[in-house]
Structures are given as structure tokens and as C-alpha cells.
Image (cartoon, coloured by chain):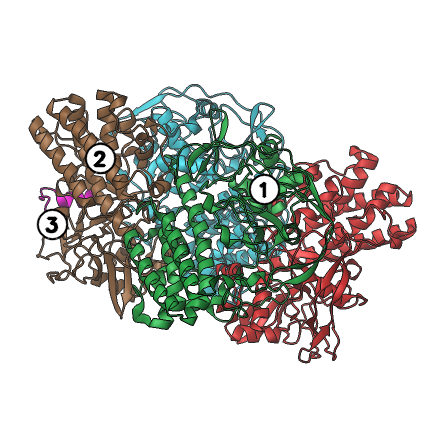
Chain colours: A cyan, B red, C green, D brown
Amino acid sequence: MLSTSNPESAVLKSNTAALKRFQGVRATTETLAAGLSDADATVQSMPDASPMKWHLAHTSWFFEEFVVAPERGETARFDPEFSYLFNSYYDGVGDRHDRGSRGLLTRPALERILDYRQHVTSHMEELITAGNQRALNLLPLGLAHEEQHQELALTDILHLFAQNPLRPAYRHAKPLAYDTLSGSNAWVKFEGGVMPLGYDGPDFHFDCEAPSHDVIVHPFELASRTVTNSEWMTFMSAGGYNTPAYWLSDGFAACQANGWTAPLYWFEQDGAWWSQTLRGAQPVDPDAPVHHISYYEADAYACFAKARLPTEAEWEFAATDKLVQGNFLESGRLRPAPQPTRKNEISALFGDVWEWTASPFVPYPGFRPEDGTIGEYNGKFMSNVIVLKGGSCVTPKDHVRASYRNFFHPDKRWQFSGLRLAR
Amino acid sequence: MLSTSNPESAVLKSNTAALKRFQGVRATTETLAAGLSDADATVQSMPDASPMKWHLAHTSWFFEEFVVAPERGETARFDPEFSYLFNSYYDGVGDRHDRGSRGLLTRPALERILDYRQHVTSHMEELITAGNQRALNLLPLGLAHEEQHQELALTDILHLFAQNPLRPAYRHAKPLAYDTLSGSNAWVKFEGGVMPLGYDGPDFHFDCEAPSHDVIVHPFELASRTVTNSEWMTFMSAGGYNTPAYWLSDGFAACQANGWTAPLYWFEQDGAWWSQTLRGAQPVDPDAPVHHISYYEADAYACFAKARLPTEAEWEFAATDKLVQGNFLESGRLRPAPQPTRKNEISALFGDVWEWTASPFVPYPGFRPEDGTIGEYNGKFMSNVIVLKGGSCVTPKDHVRASYRNFFHPDKRWQFSGLRLAR
Amino acid sequence: MLSTSNPESAVLKSNTAALKRFQGVRATTETLAAGLSDADATVQSMPDASPMKWHLAHTSWFFEEFVVAPERGETARFDPEFSYLFNSYYDGVGDRHDRGSRGLLTRPALERILDYRQHVTSHMEELITAGNQRALNLLPLGLAHEEQHQELALTDILHLFAQNPLRPAYRHAKPLAYDTLSGSNAWVKFEGGVMPLGYDGPDFHFDCEAPSHDVIVHPFELASRTVTNSEWMTFMSAGGYNTPAYWLSDGFAACQANGWTAPLYWFEQDGAWWSQTLRGAQPVDPDAPVHHISYYEADAYACFAKARLPTEAEWEFAATDKLVQGNFLESGRLRPAPQPTRKNEISALFGDVWEWTASPFVPYPGFRPEDGTIGEYNGKFMSNVIVLKGGSCVTPKDHVRASYRNFFHPDKRWQFSGLRLAR
Amino acid sequence: MLSTSNPESAVLKSNTAALKRFQGVRATTETLAAGLSDADATVQSMPDASPMKWHLAHTSWFFEEFVVAPERGETARFDPEFSYLFNSYYDGVGDRHDRGSRGLLTRPALERILDYRQHVTSHMEELITAGNQRALNLLPLGLAHEEQHQELALTDILHLFAQNPLRPAYRHAKPLAYDTLSGSNAWVKFEGGVMPLGYDGPDFHFDCEAPSHDVIVHPFELASRTVTNSEWMTFMSAGGYNTPAYWLSDGFAACQANGWTAPLYWFEQDGAWWSQTLRGAQPVDPDAPVHHISYYEADAYACFAKARLPTEAEWEFAATDKLVQGNFLESGRLRPAPQPTRKNEISALFGDVWEWTASPFVPYPGFRPEDGTIGEYNGKFMSNVIVLKGGSCVTPKDHVRASYRNFFHPDKRWQFSGLRLAR
């Protein structure tokens, strides 16, 4: 969440800039929902995923709950029942609708949710324009929060469409023309040393990225690019999914219990591997990064490749001074792209796929969540989850940075998660 | 299914009459779907229930699969993928979509399903008009099948809406003005004797109703009306749900595992009992028949009341020569109504609520299902289910008769199921 | 339970005879436990099964609870904690130890349980000798109860040993010399008619066997012998376990969920079928009756064989005037034996294997369980279970009769259950 | 496992010393089993626990598999079936018996397992005496392995006895006279700095303790003693188990799913808290350390106390130069004891209870498991588990050291696990 020492980020230095950014993020969310039917936006395909309608509403609820209602009174709420329906997990706010039952809410309809968005947007626009401090203070967090849900909305709709035997496309069903840029992987050496891990500077960051603190990074090597689909097929052919020696004990148990034999969404057709993508069913692109794999699979692959996953500190060490650029949501590709390999150069740290690290998500020394309900943001998830770095092809570009700590349980596969080797 | 010895029922003696009945049943189904959104018609609230879209499509698939495709060729199918999507359980037809995943099909949309209906209806109309024998032969079964799904569609949509904290009404949210006709129950005596159980006459009937065969019915008494909500509240107040002595062993295990403390859909509000109905949340009507109870609850109540449930033969004995009249789907009430009590007279055997009997659903002596896929209709469900008689307030009136054998597992509660005592 | 109209069975007409029978049954139970270690007698291999120690104790608890304590006072109990530990399901008696946790009671040790038995036996001997009415009245039921547990103790120990990769033998590990008497099956015709079903005469019988009442039995044919292992192998070879058309819907679901591909305890070794028996691992005897199959399997086989299972009334009709003789516990064989086939003659109705009928276990017209706790004997199990007839190779011969109604859930396989065809 | 750079630990510098230590550890294991019946030693009370018989056999299998069979040939094995039965999780060795079914092995009996132990012990004694290098090389690991199972055997037998309503005592049922030494907790300050974490010196250590590597420890404070039972009761009275704000998200889910309201084995009796201990049911000792709590509970308590758990590095920093002394297995107390509080002094880091740290169990930089099957020791468990430090009242004193890394899943409660606060 927004650190108290810097209530206003540099990018939001004027109310006008704040308003413009607010409107931009809100509009993007609605653009992502365009083209979906009421039914598409309602159904929940598994407890981890949420319906598009819920994402649209919850990101509005966040501003209503923490800004509009406190500033303009309870009567300014669009509908008093929405607080119960669209709270996600903030116990401090009160009871909430069961997570696994989000898909049973055929009412309110999509159209009404869009009205709700407009209602909250209008209030917020007025408050921002008027320089309301609560609105401006919460804005960076609220927009970062909404961007997180933009990515989740896409991974969730992909999961839903993947359950449909008709294999609908979310966008552009036409096959991509694939590049074949990817050469063989190269190892890039890093000397390591004492480095500041995390971020607590003036720009927006989540609470869990702070405080910045010194850690010792021992010498290591990092792969110049992420592991590709074609490399993954080699692992599969070599019996990787059936060889317990490559796997963590919990990982192999998960592999067997879930019957994993390939990345999520892969299926065989006429002797070739295809996968369900946001562009519908498409042939697997051999040179593109593998994605939709769990941490357990990533770790098993690393063992198979006689390497390991990088720690969060190593990854962040390598990312120092790198610009955040790559294949993000804005490209419209909606799929990872083959990554160029250049000698002694790390490519594509940002974008394409979230990279599993070897690091459990733990608090940094001196970490303290904000007081109050808003403090329920990250700290309470600091168990059993693993840090991922770098953002993916469905992450908004402005959302991510080197210190950004994404996290998921090690058996989760429905995000655009891949891996880069270290040793 | 349609008995082979009477391929054409009396009611369908002319093609014109057949066409009219066909069109009437098809139109009713569509009327039931009117007013539901694409999302309402898509979501599946539990594996036992199916989405309205699925009911609309499956009842069309039935005619397409067994009449249109055989008569007009595979190219006459609306969409070749629909055979996979909308087969229910006919193993003979081929693979089918997983039952519990019916609610994940956001595509095809409701509108396209309605087009599908029209496509099949048109083909059938032409075939019926032309006197096509396959069409005419299958018609009675196909329409009985569609009527079954009319009832299921309503019980399923009620289940869906009951999961929504907004408690939407399917129709007419306004409270009903309740009658208070119901006097205390009276016992009506029957001498019993040898009776023919079942039906194998010329009119349409399902395969499981035949052959008619003699059974001995011993003297018994039957309650003049079904158990009311107010009587059920007495059972609840007396600790009925917590007293194992009233319950079958499997029943009490189910009661505890599911946390039953009242009929399905009941909830307390400001000290009074309400229930979710097709007309939205409504106060429980004390004089109306209790409904949405399992067989286990019905049996426990009977034990509490020092009585028992009637056997199927006893019920059918009492129904001999009774006209099929009562509170059916056509009344538009969509809820059971208080039943008048008249001395020495059985009232409301038909309509209002399905009445749990004491009889497991077993084949009659000499029962033989039809050859082929169509024979998968009833016989394969003859284990672990209990017979219910009489029809409910959401059953089409023409659908039911004294020999009609409805059946559900003893722990199911989402049908309009109630009970009448015997001793 | 003991019918109130005949408190004293003919066989127990003198106290001396009663004492002798009591001592005989008690001694048999202990003989069955001989040779088992403390550990063998303690472990519970599944919730349906109970440890030998528990059978030994519970059958003593029954006499202590219903005779010794009421007659001689609470201080006459061997150990006050045993009432909690060894009650099976009598809710009227008070709390009881969780059924699935019976195997966690490593204390009291086997030796102490045998002391408990002796303690109860001594008290009972004194009461019987003294002509105590409560003792004499309960004796027939108490001994029938103990005989039921004799059979269960053997089926439970077989289940336990079958889980052990060492495949221990309960008795006589040496292979049996098999007879090959069995010819092909013949159909025997019965004209049917009105018959009295059940028994309420002067001899001991359980409450559920009464009242005797007239039923109509329609003409039928019954197989001269039960289905053999070799016939079962034909079913297996024909893909019986993979063909849904043969199965009840619930049955095929159970088949797939449990991965059934052969009767319980069968395994392949060097290309031949073996099974775990009470005599250890033994080759499957092709001519002996198939056993350790569920009702669902029996019903599927009958469908495959274009026949059906007999109803309880048909079976009992065929058994009228037949002597109870066959391969029972007393033979010491501990396995079913090949059954001779003679023209127009039903063989081996009794002994060898319990025969699944087509009849759910329902109360007979006028059935009323005894008042009080003892009435919890049969009535509360009258749902979801199927009647089996005739007794098995581990049933005590005196225990069974034509009207005897054994019952198990249709998916249970750990009893010596087989089938005989009807049509 | 044994580091390759120091195949022979200092303590085992002569064959005679090695033999003596071998004999001592083996004898201790057998002493722990003394007094248990065959049944006590056979039953498995949950999948996480193993029967004493299994511990006795598996620790022998380890020496047989990795020393006796390779050195003396397959014929030197006691029984060829034991390899399958008593392998724990070494996939490299071959198939193994299902972990959750260990308690079904009533055969081989305890006596035969003790013979097996003697057989393996004799072979090992001969090999050690003869200076066999494979035997001597494996000895440190084999004995550390056996000591781990000594502790597990006691925690497993406690779990078994806790399921028994008779609440048997493993040893000494008489209540302990409790000390009341414990004053209020004090905070001890540490400046931190760069420290070497882990151990790779000449003495025996597990593979996961190496390599030693520099880490930065930031300034911190550590509680002078562990949290006591009386402090825990305060947490309970304050609604700690019902307040989600104190809990990790996964933790509160586990708390609710399992119905936790107190530490494992606690129960109320006549208004006081008791717990099942190795000495039978005993009153909870208010001044003794709380134990049998999960990581989730420890973390929630720390949040409630406005503190946190120490990291592994902080704990090890505080333990630098501390002697390993305290309440271990050798004291025979079998329960944690109240810990003295002295100003500015950390007490009882070792013994009494394993202390949950805040650190997930991850490999140290440069960690590499041994080649071959023996390398399956620790590395494959490095996911989802949390490090515990210091040993408990049932850990052999020689087994533990500052660098020792014990680990369990965060929801496990059956070890002697407690907590010490940090901030």
C-alpha cells in the first residue's frame, strides 16, 4: 500500500495529472470487459478465479469504501448491498460474500455493474478535481489495485473460456505470425556483493516492497532468457513429469494428484501441441517462453536442467538499472513473444511471463503494514507463497518495477508464470 | 417411454392435434425462460441443477437426436457440437459434456439457444405435418420429457436465485394473500385388497409404469391432507432435527453432515420464518403444505407423528378414480396452497407438492426397458431412489397421473417435495 | 429382535438347554479369535470393519448392558468405561466411541477383553441357571446378535489381512483341493401365487422378519445354482466393468470412482487370478461361486446375462420347505465350494454365499420395532440397503433361515456376497 | 547428510568409539519401545505419524539398505520383503509401502521386528569392528537419522494415546511437581551485523546446514524465554482463536477448518485446562512453555503480542557460543519445564520446545545434496515448511546444535513446538 511518508507520488503531482491517470486506468478496465456477454462476465470457473463482473465491481467498491463513503456519507453509495457483495477479503470492513460463490450472482447484471462503475468514477472525479486529500492519498494504491485486477480479469476469463469445449477466443482468433528470434540460452555472470533489496523511495510501491535493506548476494549466473516451450517439450519427452527425482516432495504429490503432464491449457491435436490462449486455441509457439506452469514444475525443470531458480535478491540484482520495457498488456499481443538472445546480456526481465523465483514471500526486516483495514493488503498472505518477478504480457506496463513482488501458491498455474534459470 | 404396443396415443390421433400439442409444449418452455437474462440462464448453482439454457437446448437436442438427424441427415443438425454439449446421460449416443460443468458454457449464448430451439421446432413441425412416423412415434415421449424439464427448470432457477443474497424473484415479487382453509388432519380408512398397480393401457406412460400387475394392499389409513408448515414448525420446536430416535440411520447422518435445521430455503428474519420462493422471499405460509424436504426428513416427521409414509401402492389405491386436478403449473401460483379438509375425503392428492412414499423405485414384475439408447430412460436409475407421487405446483397438469412414478435420492431437497402420513 | 409374543424359543425350553446354547455360542466366538495376536485383534482396516477385540467386547457389552447391569446393578460392570467404548449404535444408551476410531484403542489389550468376556459370561451363567427372566428373554436375541458378529469378525479380519503385502492366512494356508462338480446352470420354473412372506411363528426371528403377510408372486424362473468365478471371468473378458449399458447409473459411478475391475481381493499373478482368502492367497476356483461382489456388480452381471436378480419374495418362495443345509461356518472350509447341478432342482440356496436380491430392505406391512433401546436393531437401517438371503460359508448354520433378511448398502463388497440369476 | 569433505566425524575417530556410539543409540531406541504392547507398537493414528514398530524397523532398514546389503550381499538381508515395507520415501530404492497404511501391518509382530533390529545390529557391529569404510562413513548420518526417529516415535505414540478415551500414560502417570521459576519475559538486545549462517565444519551436520555463508543480521530484540502456557491462556481469553486480524490468511483458514481453540491435546475438565502428555492426562502447567502449537498459531500469538517470530538467522545469532544444554530426552521428564528468567540473558534456547522461526526452509547459497539415493534426505522437502530451532524435551541432547534446521509444515501441531518472540 501507499507508504505514509510519501502520500503523493511524483506522477500525481497535480490534480489534473491525477485525474487523467485515474480516468485512464478506469477506462482500460472497461475496455478489457468490452465484448464479453453478461454470462461471460458472470460465471466463475474455479474458486481462485473471479468473474469479470466482480472485478469491475470490486475495483469500484474499493474507491467507494475507502474514499466516497467516508467523504460523502453512506447515502452516496450506489447500492448498500454492494458492500457485502464486492468486498474481497478485508475482514475489517465486515462480512463478505463467500469467495467461491461469486459466480452465482446473476444479478446485478453486467449493465448495472457498469452503472455502478460510472457512479463511483463520477464521485471520484469530483473529489480529485476538488483536491480532496483522502481521494488523492488513496489514488496510487487504488489504481495499482485496479491494475492488479486488470491482469487477474484476463487470466480468469482465459480460465473460463478454456473450460468451454467450443474454445472461444477473447480477442483476435487469428493465429499469430511467430518470430523465431530465440537462440540458445547463455549464462550471464554476476559478481554479487552487498545490495539494497526492496524499495522505500518516493514513488508508489506496495508496503511489502519496503523497507529497503542491505543483503549479501553471493556470485551467481543468470540465464539470458526464460525457458522456452521447445525446451519444455524436451523436459516432457524426457519423462520429466514422471520422474520424482526432479521434484520437490510436495511438488510431485501435487503433480500426481492433479494429473499434470504438460503446462495448463496445452492439448494435443493431430500430433501437435496446442494451447488455449486469449486468442483462442493456437499452436504452441516453440520459441516463446513457456507459461502457465506452477512453481513446482519450474523447480522440477530447473533440477532436470542441472540448474536452479534465482532468488528474489539475485533477480533484483540483475534488474538494477534496467528499464521497464517489454511485452506488456499495452502491446495487445496477449501472449508471450520469443525473446532475443544477445551475448552477455539479460533480455526480457520485464514482460512476457512472471518469473518464479526460489524465494518464499516473507516480510522484509522492519516491515510493518499500515494501520487499519487497508493494512490487510499484503502481510496476511505471507505464508506458503512464492515470489514472482517482472510482469507478464497481460500486466499494465506502468504497474511493475524491479522491486515489485508478486506472489502465488506454488501449485497455481493460471497466471502467465514461467521461469528463468540460475546457477 | 412410449410403449411399443401403442405407438400413437389417443390424444394425438390426428397429425393436427399432434402438431398443436407439440407447439403448445414448446411454447410453454419458452414462456418459462422469458424474463431471464443470459446470465440467469447460464449459471449452474449445484451439480444436481442445470442452467435454463441447458434445459432449453437439451429438450431440443432430444428431438434432433432421435428424429431430425435420423430422418433428415446429419447436415440438418443446427450445430454438430451441440450433440456433445447437450446430451444428458445417454451413453449410447456417445461422449457428453460433464454434468457438473454445464454452467461454464457462457457460449453459446441464450439467444443462440433460442435459435436452436426454433430450428428444431421447424423441422419437427414439417415432419409432423407430413405424418412422419418416427416423429409421431417419439412425440409423446419427447413431450413428456420436455415437461419434466419444465419442472426441473423452475426448481433449478429457484435454487440459483436462493444462492443470491439479493433474493431475486423469478415472477411476481408481491406477497400472496394466503387462504386459511386447512383444518386439522383427518384419517381416511381404506380396506385394501388386490389391486392392479401401474399402467399399461393405451395412453402415454413411461416404461417404468408398466406392466400393470396385481398386488395385495393391506388395510391402511391415509391422512386427508399433506403435512403443513405449521405442523412442521412443531416438529422443529420439539427438537425433531436433533433427535436421532426419529431418524433413519443414514438420514440422521445426512442431517448432521448437511446441517439441516429447517426445510430448504427457510431463513429466520425478525423472529419469523421466511423462505425463498419463485416469488422472491416470502413469509412461510403456516397452513400450506411443507415442501423442499428430503425423504429422510419426511420419514423422521412421520416417526415423530407416530405414523409412517404410505407405500406407492397405498397412494395409488387411494388415487383410484380420482380426477387429476389441483394446483399445477398452469395456476401460475408457483407455490403450494393450503388444502381444504373434508371429512372422510382425501384432498389434493394431485398438485401442490410431490408426496414422498415409503417405496424405493424398483421395476415392476416383467419390466423391460425399450431396446436401444432410448431405453436408458428410467431403468438405470432404479437404485437408491424413492418414489414420489402426485405432482406439484410447478408440474404441468397434463403430465401427471395416478400411475406416475417420480423418483429422487432420499437426501434431495430442491424439488417441491412434501409428505402425507399413513398408518 | 425377540418377538414379545414368544419370549422363550422352543430350543431354549429349559434353563439347561439355554445355558448350553449360551456357552456354545460364547465359546465359538473365542475360538474364532484364537491365533490372532493383540495387534491383529486391535487394528481397524476401514470404517465398515471392526477389530476382533471390538467384536469380542461388544458382544459382551450387549449382555452386560441389557441384562447384567439392570439385574445386578452398575457395580457389577467389569469396567464403567467399557459402556462408552463398546456400544455400537444404540443412541438410547448414551454417547459412544466414534465408529471409525475403534482401531485406535490399543488399550485395553486383548487379554483384558478376554477377561471381560469371562466376567460377563459368568454373570450370565448364574442368571440363566437361576432362571432369571430378563436373561432368558434376551438370550435368543443376544445369541443371534453374537452370531452376526462371528461372521463380521471373519469378514473384517479377512479385510485387514488383505491390506498386508505379506498376505497372511487366518487359518490353514495350504491350498484347497477343488471339486469340479459344477455343470452348466439350469433354469427352474416356479408358478408363483399368493404366499406368506416373512415369519412370525414361535421360533426366534428378528423383528424385521415379521409380520408374515400375503404377497402375490408372479411366475418366474430361478437359476439352479449361483454364478461361478469362471462365469464372472467371462463377464470381465467381455468388458463388463467398462460397459455402462450393463450398469445402474449409481452403480457405474461407484465402479469408476472405486476403480473396480474384478471382485474384491482378486489380483493377478503370473497370468492367473488369485484372491486373498481366509486361507491366505489362493488361486481363484473357477467352479466355485463368485463372491465379494457388490449389488451393483451383481445387477450388472445379471443385465449382461440377459437376466435379473430375484426378488426377496421369489427367493423365499423357492426356499419354502427347503432344509437349511450347506457350506456354513461349521464346515471349517472358510471358502465357498462348487455347487452340484441337478436337473430341475435348486441347489445351495443356503450357505456358500449370501445372495443379493433385487429387493430394497423395507418394513413389512405392520412392522413395529420393539419399544426402547433394543428397538434400534433393524428398523433404522431401512434405507439404501438391499436384502441378501441364504447365509454364507462363514455364517453359523443355526443362525439362518428362509425368512432371514440380511442387508448391506449396494456398494459394499467385503461380505461373502454373490448372486443367483432369475428371469 | 554426511558432508563428503569430512567422512569421519571427530567423535567417531576410532572404531571403538564408533561402535560404542552405535550401540548406545540402538539401545536407546529399544529402551523407548519398552513397555509398549504389540498393539501399541502397530497402530498408526494419522498419516503423519508412524507406528513404533515402523520406527524400529525403518531405522534398521536404513543400515541394511545402505551398508549391510551392499557389503554383504542381498542374502544378508533379514527378510527380502522388509525392503518394500520399511522404506520411507527414498524413490531411488524402489517401490515402497503406502505411508498412510503403515498401521495395517499387524504382521510382522513386534517381536519379529526386534529380531530384525538385532540382526542388523550384529552385522553392523561386525562391520564397524572390522573398520569397514562404508559402515563408518554412513554411521554419523545413520545415527542422526535414528535419533530423529527416536523423537518422532515419542511424538507419534503420544498422538496415538491421545486418541484413546482411557488416556493411557506412556511413562510415569504420576503428576509432576511443577517449578514456578518463570518471571515475566524480558527483551534482550542484539546489535546484529554480518554473521556466518549455517555450518560446514568437521563435525557431523546435515547437508542442509551447509554451506556456511555470510548474511547481514539487522538489529533485533529477542525474548529471554519462550511463551508460557499462562500467556497462551491470555491469548485464548482475548478471543485469539476467533480474531482474523491476528492471523495469516492461510492460518485462519486452517484454524477454522480444523476447529482449533487451544493447543493440541488440551481439554477442559472441571473448569481447568488439562492436556494429554507422555505421562498421561496432566493439568496444564501455567509457567511451562506452551507447546503443540502450529506455526500459524505461533504467528498469530506474536501478532497479538505486538511482536513477531525471530528469523532463523536471528535465532542462530543469539545462539552463537551458547552451550547445548537444557531439558532434553535424557532428563526423562518428557515434558517442557518452566524456564528461569535472568536479566539480559537468553535462557533455554536449547531443549524444552522446538521454537518456530519466521523462516521458510530454503537451501543455503551453494547447497547441493549428495548424489544418489542418500541425497533424498532434506532437499526435496524445501517447500512449504518452516524452520524450527533448538530441540525439545524429547530430542536426544547430542542430536542438536545451533545450526540444526528442523522443519515442519505450518499447520502441524504434533511435535513439541512452541515459540519465542522477537521484535
Amino acid type at circle 3 is Ser
Q: Where does residue C70 sit, x and y in percent of width and height? A: 38, 72
* Residue D223: quadrant of the picture: bottom left
According to the picture, the residue beneath numbered tag 1 turns out to be C297
Pointer 2 indicates a residue of which chain? D
D318 within the magenta span: yes
* Of callouts 2 and 3, the N-terminal one: 2
- Say yes or no: labels 1 and 2 on the same chain: no
- The front one of A86 and D147 is D147
Would residue A36 be seen by someone viewing this image from the given angle? no
D242 within the magenta span: no
Q: What label sits on residue C67 in the rendered view?
A: none
Q: Does A66 sit above or below residue D410?
A: below
Label 1: which secondary element: helix
According to the picture, the residue beneath numbered tag 2 turns out to be D115
Q: Where does residue A367 sit, x and y in percent of width and height? A: 28, 49
Left or right of A146: which side holds D78? left
Pointer 1 indicates a residue of which chain? C
- The front one of D394 and B44 is D394
Residues shaded magenta: D313-325
Label 3: which secondary element: helix
Q: Does B134 sit above or below residue B215?
A: above
Quadrant where the C terminus of chain A sits is top left
According to the picture, the residue beneath numbered tag 3 turns out to be D331
Q: Residue at x 87, y 49 (%)?
A: B8
Left or right of C275: which side holds D101? left
Q: Where does residue A402 sit, x and y in percent of width and height? A: 36, 37
